[in-house]
């Protein structure tokens, strides 16, 4: 990817790294800018279409990002809470991000050749799109820097006590923001626990590092891109993922969990989705009973349900809660969610119509058959509904204990995916269907 950034861009971005330029480039002949003292300032704040590399196809560029997570453990007994140094190692989690981010002219405007006036001072309070998940994080340090003539000028930003990132003024075009952020670390709960983490940010990134400090007190399983570095410490093991020159969306995903069997994964998913379903059903019943007018607002057939959800809600991935549907009140207010919320709402609405459905977990990428012998929450990135006929349900129930891939044969059944543009469409490949708290089966979704 480095071949998409020419030496001029590398030279102008190099001072914002800690000690040396990125990759194999070296900052040679820095005095070459003396003939044009505002070269770098112009390049970063007003690059023309020919100069701007295609790699920089976003309004923000992550120059350098270093993320660190050390989860805490759910220590409940009094004896465990008084274990001295171990208490600090287990109970005190840490989640921090040190990031250097450059604001670029809006890419769409730049591509169209639109010239717009840029504010000369920090006027807006808007979290940069690549760092939205850090909006409520505490700001420990914030420094602003930019090219001015032939030097880089740097000044700290005044930080109030307990100031959050979303309260920080947005830098103007051409300015670089250096941040030290922290937020509440995830807690490894007693029993089953899972974390889904992106190894990329939603912007072009020159350098991204993710460090996960896994406590020895509990056995964790990993699914996804392997760590480049692995070392052991007194209270755990430290795994490091490093990537350079990532385009937006590249870098892969990491799944970490305490579940090492399909029965544990089944129970964990059932508890979260079934509890959410009961809540959605309860709220919908309450709304239907509160007004005769509301009754006619809700869809009354499966086809109408699919159309109604698609028309009234916007698909928006919920990365902070990848395995648990958000509360229905929040979903109805925001009208934004992903397959978890869409499917749970559809299941509750279909039940009101007398339709029996079951949750089916699958993936946008084909799940290989050896997944049956390799339990991991990471195989799944999508959920939809299975609508069986009595014969199909009877066959699935009788065959579920076999732990093999079940062919539903010629029995009548349908797949209901409320995120799909048309009813009946679903990702093809292996899927795991949950029939009850302890029972499920594997089958193929076919065209």
Image (cartoon, helix red, strand yellow):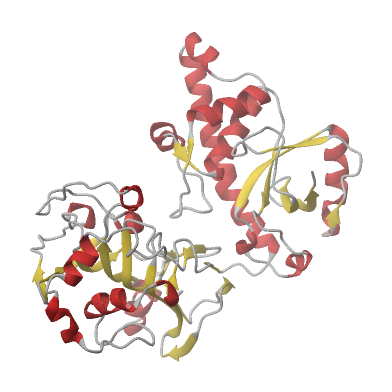
Name the residue located 84 percent from the left edge and 45 percent from the top edge. Answer: 396
**Where 346 falls versus 198 (above or below)?**
above
Residue 248 spot, x, y in % from top left:
44, 61
Question: Nearest the camera: 178 or 359?
Answer: 178
Q: In this view, does 267 lie to the left or right of 256?
A: right
Q: In this view, does 225 lie to the left or right of 335?
A: right
Question: Nearest the camera: 399 or 105?
Answer: 105
Residue 189 seen anywhere in this rendered image of the structure: no
Residue 48 spot, x, y in % from top left:
29, 59
Residue 77, quarter of the rendered image: bottom left
Name the residue located 11 percent from the left edge and 77 percent from the top edge. Answer: 151
Question: Nearest the camera: 294 or 178?
Answer: 178
Name the residue located 9 percent from the left edge and 60 percent from the top edge. Answer: 160
Q: How many labels does the image show?
A: 0
In the rendered image, the quadrant that contains the C terminus is top right
Residue 28, quarter of the rendered image: bottom left
Residue 431 seen anywhere in this rendered image of the structure: yes
Residue 334 spot, x, y in % from top left:
39, 35
Residue pushed farthest right? 410
Residue 113 spot, x, y in % from top left:
30, 49
Residue pushed farthest top? 292
**Where 56 falls versus 291 (above or below)?**
below
Q: In this view, does 434 lie to the left or right of 149?
A: right
Name the residue located 70 percent from the left edge and 35 percent from the top edge. Answer: 357
Residue 430, quarter of the rendered image: bottom right
């Amino acid at each position: 990817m480095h071949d998409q950034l020419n030496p001029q861009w590398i030279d102008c971005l190099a001072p914002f790294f800690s000690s040396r330029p990125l990759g194999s480039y070296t900052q040679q002949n820095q005095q070459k800018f003396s003939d044009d003292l505002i070269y770098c300032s112009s390049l970063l704040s007003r690059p023309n279409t020919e100069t701007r590399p295609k790699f920089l196809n976003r309004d923000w560029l992550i120059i350098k990002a270093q993320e660190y997570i050390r989860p805490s453990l759910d220590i409940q007994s009094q004896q465990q809470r008084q274990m001295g140094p171990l208490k600090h190692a287990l109970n005190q989690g840490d989640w921090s991000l040190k990031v250097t981010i450059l604001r670029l002219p809006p890419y769409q405007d730049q591509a169209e050749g639109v010239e717009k006036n840029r504010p000369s001072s920090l006027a807006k309070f808007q979290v940069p799109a690549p760092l939205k998940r850090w909006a409520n994080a505490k700001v420990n340090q914030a420094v602003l820097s930019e090219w001015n003539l032939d030097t880089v000028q740097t000044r700290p930003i005044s930080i109030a006590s307990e100031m959050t990132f979303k309260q920080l003024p947005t830098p103007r075009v051409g300015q670089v923001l250096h941040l030290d952020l922290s937020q509440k670390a995830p807690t490894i709960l007693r029993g089953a626990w899972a974390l889904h983490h992106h190894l990329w940010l939603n912007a072009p990134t020159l350098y991204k590092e993710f460090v996960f400090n896994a406590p020895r007190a509990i056995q964790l399983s990993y699914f996804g891109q392997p760590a480049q570095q692995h070392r052991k410490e007194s209270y755990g093991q430290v795994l490091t993922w490093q990537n350079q020159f990532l385009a937006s969306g590249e870098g892969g995903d990491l799944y970490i969990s305490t579940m090492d069997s399909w029965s544990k994964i089944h129970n964990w998913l059932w508890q979260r989705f079934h509890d959410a379903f009961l809540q959605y059903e309860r709220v919908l019943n309450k709304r239907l009973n509160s007004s005769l007018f509301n009754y006619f607002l809700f869809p009354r057939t499966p086809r109408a349900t699919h159309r109604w959800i698609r028309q009234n809600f916007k698909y928006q991935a919920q990365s902070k809660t990848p395995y648990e549907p958000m509360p229905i009140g929040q979903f109805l207010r925001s009208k934004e969610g992903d397959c978890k919320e869409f499917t749970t709402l559809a299941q509750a609405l279909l039940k009101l119509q007398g339709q029996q459905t079951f949750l089916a977990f699958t993936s946008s990428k084909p799940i290989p058959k050896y997944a049956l012998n390799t339990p991991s929450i990471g195989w799944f990135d999508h959920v939809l509904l299975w609508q069986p006929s009595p014969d199909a349900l009877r066959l699935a129930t009788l065959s579920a204990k076999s732990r093999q891939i079940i062919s539903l044969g010629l029995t009548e059944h349908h797949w209901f995916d409320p995120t799909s543009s048309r009813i009946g469409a679903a990702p093809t490949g292996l899927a795991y269907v949950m029939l009850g708290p302890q029972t499920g089966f594997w089958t193929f979704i076919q065209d």
